[in-house]
Structure formats: structure tokens, C-alpha cells
Image (spheres, grey):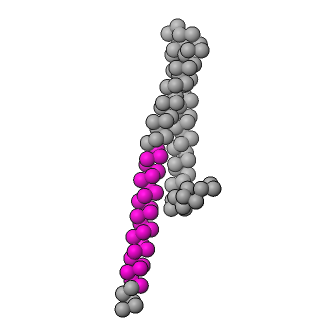
């Protein structure tokens, strides 16, 4: 990642968390492909022309993937925000402890 904001966000996550979200994203794409294949077969079985069936199935897969990835991104955002709050809280506590020692 080249974006420093992305680098900071990922640095707040444990390797297991990054791996979990990567696997979840990969599973979303696999699920979308399965939806496309099943929907296309279903549309063709109902008599729809192959081109129309494939196009409609592709749209269904895209909608599914976009919705699922949006939910996944929202969850990832919440995890990163929680981690950031913890970092800030620890920094605040360290600052206050340092101030007490100076007095």
C-alpha cells in the first residue's frame, strides 16, 4: 500500500485480522461467481436468450458483491476505529502519567 492513511489503518490491525478480512473478501467474490453461474443457468433454463441470461446474472452477482463488500468494509472500518481509540486512550494515559510524574 502506498497511501499513508491505508498503511496506518492496517498497522492498527493484527495479522490475523487482516487475514480474516482478506479471506472474507475472497469468499464474497467466490459467492458472487456462484450466484452468477446459478442465475445464468436458471435464466437459460427458463428460456431466456443466453446473452440476456448472462447479462442479468452478471448484474445480480455485481449487486451481491457490492452489498457484501460494503458490509465488510463497514465492519473493517469499525474494527480499525476501535483499535485507533485504544491507541489514543493508551497515549492519553501515558501523557497523563507523565504529567503526574512532572508535578
Q: Quadrant of residue 85?
A: bottom left
Q: Is residue 38 magenta?
A: no
At which x and y percent is residue 98? 41, 85
Question: Quick one: quadrant of the C terminus?
Answer: bottom left
Magenta segment range? 72-98
Residue at the top extreme of this rendering: 47
User: Residue drawn at (39%, 76%), measured in percent from left and top?
Assistant: 93
Judged from this view, the residue extending furthest toward the bottom is 103
Query: Quick check: 97 above or below 3?
Result: below
Residue 92 belongs to magenta span: yes
Q: Position of residue 48 (x, y in %)?
A: 53, 10
Residue shown at 52% from the left, 28% from the top: 61
Q: Main secondary structure of the magenta part?
A: helix
Left or right of 83, for residue 40? right
Residue 4, position as x, y percentages in the image: 58, 59
Q: Is residue 41 visible?
A: no
Does residue 100 appear left or right of residue 52 in this picture? Answer: left
Amino acid at each position: 500500500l502506498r497511501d499513508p492513511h491505508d498503511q496506518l489503518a492496517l498497522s492498527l490491525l493484527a495479522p490475523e485480522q487482516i487475514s480474516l478480512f482478506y479471506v472474507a473478501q475472497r469468499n464474497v467474490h467466490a459467492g458472487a461467481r456462484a450466484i452468477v453461474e446459478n442465475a445464468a443457468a436458471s435464466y437459460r433454463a427458463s428460456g431466456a436468450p443466453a446473452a440476456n441470461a448472462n447479462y442479468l446474472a452478471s448484474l445480480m452477482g455485481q449487486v451481491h458483491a457490492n452489498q457484501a463488500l460494503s458490509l465488510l468494509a463497514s465492519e473493517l472500518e469499525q474494527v480499525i476505529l476501535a483499535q485507533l481509540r485504544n491507541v489514543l486512550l493508551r497515549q492519553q494515559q501515558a501523557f497523563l502519567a507523565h504529567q503526574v510524574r512532572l508535578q
